Amino acid sequence: MPVLSFRLKLVLAMMLAVAGVSTTTLFVTERRVQAYYEQMFRAQFQRQISYFTSLQEARLGVVREQCLKLTQSVRLIAALKEPETELPLVYEVAEGELRGVLNEVRTEPGAAPIPEPNRFRATFLRFLDARGKPIPPPDNLRTRFAALAPKPRLDQNLSFVRETLAELQQVGYLGVTHDARPLNTPRLAARAKNPQGGQTLDAQALQEVIVTKVVDPIDGKMAGALVLGFPLPELVPQPRPRPGSDPATHLEAIQNGVFLEDRLYADTNLISEATEAEVAHLVGPRVRAEPRPEADFSCEILQVPYRVFYALLNDRSVFAPAYQVYLYSMEEARQAQRDLRNKILGWSAVAMAGALLLSFLLSNGLTVPIRELVAGTAEISGGNLAVRVPVRSRDEIGQLAESFNNMAAGLAQKDVYRRCLNLVADEKVAKQLVSGEISLGGSVQDVSVLFCDIRGFTPLTQYMPPDEVIAMINEHMTALTAVVKKHNGVLDKFVGDLLMAVFGAPVRHENDTLAAGRCALELLEERQKLNQTARHRLQVRVGLATGPVVAGCIGSVDRLNYTVLGERVNLASRLCTQAEDGEVLIDQTTKERLNGLLVVEPATAMHLKGFDKPVDVYRLIALKT
């Protein structure tokens, strides 16, 4: 996986933030626009339904009163009790009583009926006998009431009324045919001009039907029923806005119709035939699956988005349920959403560009100090503790740079302390002192102790200038110290011209005694090499002893010196004092532990200061080939 730089991560984070905010804003805005339009459409739907309900109540109040008054007429009840051949006379009885609500036809041939202005007129009249069978009008009234001629489909639809009339009056809706055209013809509510001018009802219309029972007051039995029908499209005119009113409160002419028995009855000027069929196909399954007084849904009709609302018109009616259907085009809402989307995307692009520029500026202000810190840490890893980074600000990044500089200064100071400690103590001892592995006190260790000094140093330096003495000693000790470290020895101390080294403490190795013997021989060789180039020729001698000693830090809590103490240390010092120029004297224990790996020869036993008995001494001659 590729490693992304901090600057790129910051830029990506800014871009993602802007993209996230833009996407969220776009989503919320589109939802709110859609919710606003749906709320507006629902409110308009409620106003339309309220308008239709109020119009229906105002109209039916008068019609119902007239119908009830007629059904209580003694003449009408008596006419309904006449023999079947005389039953059509009920239309003559009703003619005078219902003249105010009937849509009369002119007697001139071909003339159209002219209703009074702003009055709703019934377009058909039927009477049912006591068995619920429609009573046809008499022949002498067929011409006068042409709209009231027998309709086979109407008679069939009304045949169930007697069985379902539980109440005195019922309101329902029926599709009525005026000629031989099939009932499923989609154009159901349009008007057409006749040849002589004027308007006539078209071939098929949706009728609002009021059925009133005629009850004989003597025996309380049903004598028949009166059926009046009104063309529904005429009964629901579209409200027009009042001059100067707020356009937002208008009930504008919208696509609407009535859904009845899997057909949509609508105005040809509002809904096309294809739309009408599609709406009927969508609404039908819904009202059958879950009949509700009111509902709505979204759909696409002829590739145009719509919100469809529908409400039940004849609740608790024995007639087939009829629904008022309203279609609201969502194209305007979609267009508003598109406009908002384009604006939001445009502003998002501007914000993205601004965020990109800002992120580059911010990332530059952040990444430059960070790159300097990274470069500084690399310098410290390489050993350059003098490195410093510029403090460019006073914020957290500036504080970090300042802390880095303080850390570098502290490391440099600690490095000085470490180097100073290495100068006054062996490196191995210094590391264990720093790590805390060595503390005040000591422990018994088995080691080899080596002493090496310059033969005749005092007479040699008696008249030598001090600075020359120091230069000579430093040159001598530097060369010998390198030999000691080469053989894993620990440089214990310098005492004037004397060098003391320990092998086996504080760190043990596989064969410290053999390393000490080899170191002793190489010290002599190193001094001989140095004599070839040095100003002063010096002769050194070495004493080496092996055995148990006390090793540890000797001193106080605030000043320590790591060293070894014991009889073996004194023995090595005495052997060094007794050795001749270029000679290495060792004790019995050292000889035994060398195990014949080096050339050793016995020397005369010596009486040494501090030892009661003579000490067996051996000379270390050379390495075995």
Image: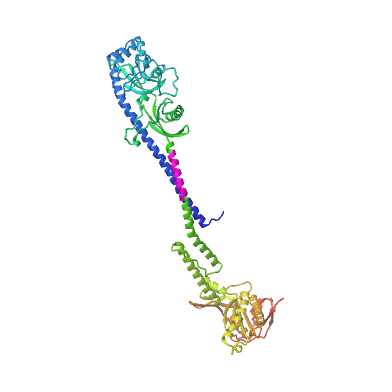
Asked if residue 341 is among those painted magenta in the image, a careful observer would answer yes
Q: Nearer the viewer, residue 85 or 12?
A: 12
Q: Quadrant of the C terminus?
A: bottom right
User: Is 324 on the left or on the right of 522, as rendered?
Assistant: left
User: Is 366 on the left or on the right of 240, as rendered?
Assistant: right
Q: Quadrant of residue 174?
A: top left
Q: Nearer the viewer, residue 72 or 437?
A: 72
Q: Name the residue rendered at 46%, 46% in the picture.
A: 346
Q: Residue furthest right?
A: 625
Up the image or down, 236 lies above or below 530; here it is above
Picture coordinates of residue 376 (x, y %)? 52, 65
Up the image or down, 189 lies above or below 347; here it is above
Picture coordinates of residue 500 (x, y %)? 59, 80
Q: Residue furthest front?
A: 196
Q: Nearer the viewer, residue 517 or 230?
A: 230
Picture coordinates of residue 12 (x, y %)? 50, 53
Which stretch appears magenta? 334-351
Is residue 438 at least partly visible in the picture? no
Q: How many marks?
A: 0
Q: Quadrant of residue 214?
A: top left
Q: Nearer the viewer, residue 167 or 186?
A: 186
Q: Quadrant of residue 316?
A: top left
Main secondary structure of the magenta stretch: helix
Is residue 49 at least partly visible in the picture? yes
Asked if residue 534 is among those painted magenta in the image, a careful observer would answer no
Q: How is the rendered protein coloured?
A: rainbow
Picture coordinates of residue 561 (x, y %)? 53, 78
